[in-house]
Amino acid sequence: MQALAAVLLARGWRLTGSDVDPGAADWLAGRDVTVHAGHDARHIDARADLVMHSDAVGEDNVERRRAARLGIAQSSYPQAVAGLMAHKRGIAVAGTHGKSTTTAMIGAIMVAAGVDPTVIGGAAPLDGGPCGGRAGRGPWLVAEACEYRANFLRLRPEIAVILNIEPDHFDCYPTPRALERAFVRFMSQAGRNGTGRTVVANLDCPATRRCLAAAGCRAMTFGLAADACWRPAHVEETGGLHRFTVLQAGRKFCEIRLRVPGRHQVSNALAAVAAAQEAGIAAGAIERGLSEFAGIHRRLERVASLGGVEILDDYAHHPTEVRATLAAVRLMYPNRRVWCLFQPHQVSRTRALVDDFASSLQNADRVAVADVFAAREVAGAAPRAVAEDLAARARRLGGTVLPGHQLQTIVGDVAAAARPGDVVLTMGAGDIRKHLP
């Protein structure tokens, strides 16, 4: 929502807003935008032309109800992004993992190329800017395309990027087949033959392969797979950072040196390279854009070094992401004790993937599992019960797991027990970052 606000402000819109945590958008106050604390019907001005809302704000919200009574038009965030993309050449980045980073990578490449893109992403860049939004004057709009509630089907991008497909949103996709059907529809409408539209797809992901075959659309593929069009070669790693040669159909296209840690970023970068080249960006600009890309907030972000203890923060909230993040930390800090303070996100997701979560946490030396952050859910006592179950399963696999689950308490316990040379990683898509010292 902040990224969307940034784009609309730059285009001359007059905005107000409401948030349960108004401090998260302090930067808007400097742009003459009032952000109210909490939701109240009085926040809706009868003179407003439009009320935009995130998918986390349902029809029963007091502000949305007042807007309805006043006859004010309403738009969800996905509808708003689709409306903006309809007037641009669109690149939509979809997948279970890596959307924010890959969206920002493509944006950085286009900035380096002088294309001046509009970008709507989920996290602020580490090297400047208060949010993931950028209002450019060029022809391209790059945006995340989330599969939640099939929202990505609203978009009609010229280039659709599919990073990976794994079960994640169990509150709207009860089975993997239901999830894959949504991705097939997205690929089909994005890559229709004769329209000039293209799908950029990861062949290392079995579900993506299946969906691509079912969709029967025009595609450019990437990955380690031998039949992928875009592949990495001569991959080298130093301190968690990777450099590699990009091959296009077996021929050298460019050299990439990444500043963001983790082997998974090689795949994200390949996707960005393929999408950028499909958009007409030259190899030199792609190299410059990725070499200058410093990353985004809450993606293995170095927060502080306190008393010789390194503190990192990451948004991982799926077992695949937890594994990738911990693997990257091991490369960055070999032979150091790693603490992982994990705040699960959503009761439904944690219950469905509890054994995978327990396994994914084993690469940390010490683990603390906080109460589940029950976003979009009425969970009752489940956040504590599910956290206790996850902790117990992680212990049975051999992990060393702290006994408590109250977030502030375990942060204090880890702060007291960590010693110089340790690495403390906070992890989760909830509010765990706010509890860091």
Image (cartoon, rainbow, N blue to C red):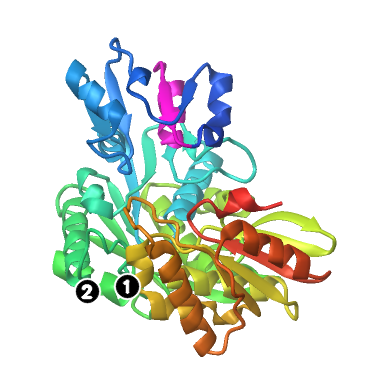
Task: Look at discs 1 and 2 and give the one toward the viewer.
Answer: 1
| Residue located at (42% from left, 51% from top) | 276
How many numbered circles does the render carry? 2
Where residue 38 appears, as percent x and y from the top left, is: 43, 31
**Of 352 and 77, the residue lying toward us:** 352
Whether tag 1 and tag 2 are in contact, CB under 8 A, the answer is no
Horizontal side, residue 255 vs residue 207: left or right: right
Q: In this view, does 213 lie above or below 47?
A: below
- Seen as rendered, the residue at the extreme top is 47
Magenta extent: 1-20
Where residue 159 appears, as percent x and y from the top left, is: 30, 50
Where residue 95 appears, as percent x and y from the top left, is: 34, 60
| Residue located at (44% from left, 22% from top) | 9
Q: How crowded is mark 2: few (under 14 residues within 10 Å), some or many (20 or more)?
A: few
Q: Which amino acid does label 2 sit on?
A: Arg
**Of 13 and 423, the residue lying toward us:** 423
- List the residue tagged with mark 1: 352
Q: In this view, does 216 lie above or below 303?
A: below
Among the two numbered marks 1 and 2 on one chain, the one whose residue lies closer to the N terminus: 2
Horizontal side, residue 368 vs residue 376: left or right: right
| Residue 82 in sight here | yes
Is residue 2 inside the magenta stretch?
Answer: yes
Q: Which amino acid does label 1 sit on?
A: Ala
| Residue 117 in sight here | no
Horizontal side, residue 263 vs residue 95: left or right: right
- Seen as rendered, the residue at the extreme front is 381
**Of 359 and 300, the residue lying toward us:** 359
Q: Label 1, secondary structure: give it.
A: helix
Label at residue 210: 2
